[in-house]
Image (spheres, rainbow, N blue to C red):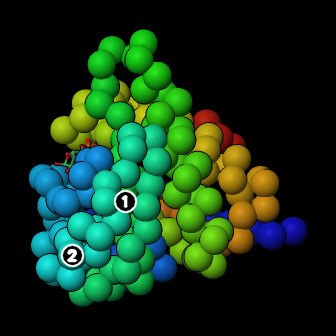
Amino acid sequence: MRIVMVEIIKDDITTLKVDAIVNAANHTLLGGGGVDGAIHRAAGPRLRAECAMVGGCPTGSAKLTEGYDLPARFVVHAVGPVWRGGDEGEDELLASCYRKAMQLAEEHRIDSIAFSCISTGAYGFPFERACGIALSEIFRALDEGSRVKQVYCVCFSDDDFEIYDRILSTFGQ
Ligand code: AR6
């Protein structure tokens, strides 16, 4: 049986030496605040230059670039939904970000991937609900035979870590 590790960690995602980190970007892909700003600062100006060539990304999708000065080889820029109360397709759009990121991991032969908590900061998506959606999609991709061997879900606070870890335990992990 193949063992895939899904781990909740508390860390600064820009410091992780994995094949790919997943950014919580906006549709311009040209940088912003939060984890997006931190990733662009750490990766250096070549990241913004490549992002400018990509030409944006719709909400619910993701695009892959090099990692440049980051320890990670690639950055997957996922554009999560802004939370507008839950009746505007936010759950499905968030799920779609995770599906697309796992698909890009497959296409680029990525073994290890670290996800930021997409949409849960400036975009206001309720944290617990986002964790459940993230884990459902990650486990679905793994069950469908993804080649990814190690998945990290990266939290930035102790409170977020505790919540995410509790939700992971409900997935039988
Ligand atoms: N490492 C890991 N997680 C982090 C880090 C870090 N260095 N910094 C913040 N987080 P947000 P969003 C967590 O607001 O809600 C940007 O301006 C943070 O605690 O970065 O998808 C973009 O350009 C939170 O749990 O992303 C967009 O315009 C999570 O990252 C918009 O914000 C996501 O929070 C996207 O908003």
Q: Is residue 8 above or below residue 150?
A: above
Residue at horizontal 26 percent and vertical 57 percent from the top: 29
- Res. 112 mark: none
Q: Give the amino acid at mark 1.
A: His
Horizontal relation, residue 123 to residue 21: left or right: left
**Which element is circle 2 on?**
helix
21 sits to left or right of 122: right
Secondary structure of the residue carrying tag 1 is: strand
Residue marked by disc 2: 49
Relative to 94, is 44 above or below? below
How packed is label 1: few (under 14 Cα within 10 Å), some, or many (20 or more)?
many
> Which residue: 53% across, 38% down?
95
Three-letter amino acid code of the residue under disc 2: Ala
- Alpha carbons under labels 1 and 2: distance apart: 14 Å
User: What is the total number of numbered labels drawn onto the structure image?
Assistant: 2
In primary-sequence order, the first of circles 1 and 2 is 2
Q: Are marks 1 and 2 in contact (CB under 8 Å)?
A: no
Residue 133, position in %: x, y? 53, 36
Task: Judge by depth and name the residue closer to the eye, 28 or 116.
Answer: 28
**Where is residue 153 shown, x and y percent of the image?**
44, 56
Q: Mark 1 = which residue?
A: 77
Q: Is residue 41 left or right of residue 104?
A: left
Q: Position of residue 115 (x, y in %)?
A: 42, 58
The quarter of the image holding the N terminus is bottom right
Whether residue 23 is visible: no
Estimate the x, y position of residue 150 in percent, counting from the top left.
Answer: 58, 70
Residue 141 in sight here? yes
Which residue corresponds to the image point at 43% horizontal and 68% vertical from the top-left? 64
Q: Nearer the viewer, residue 45 or 22?
A: 45
Q: Nearer the viewer, residue 95 or 58?
A: 58
For the residue pair 76 and 15, the one nearer the viewer reads as 76
Q: Kindly indicate the quadrant of the structure image that contains residue 159.
A: top left
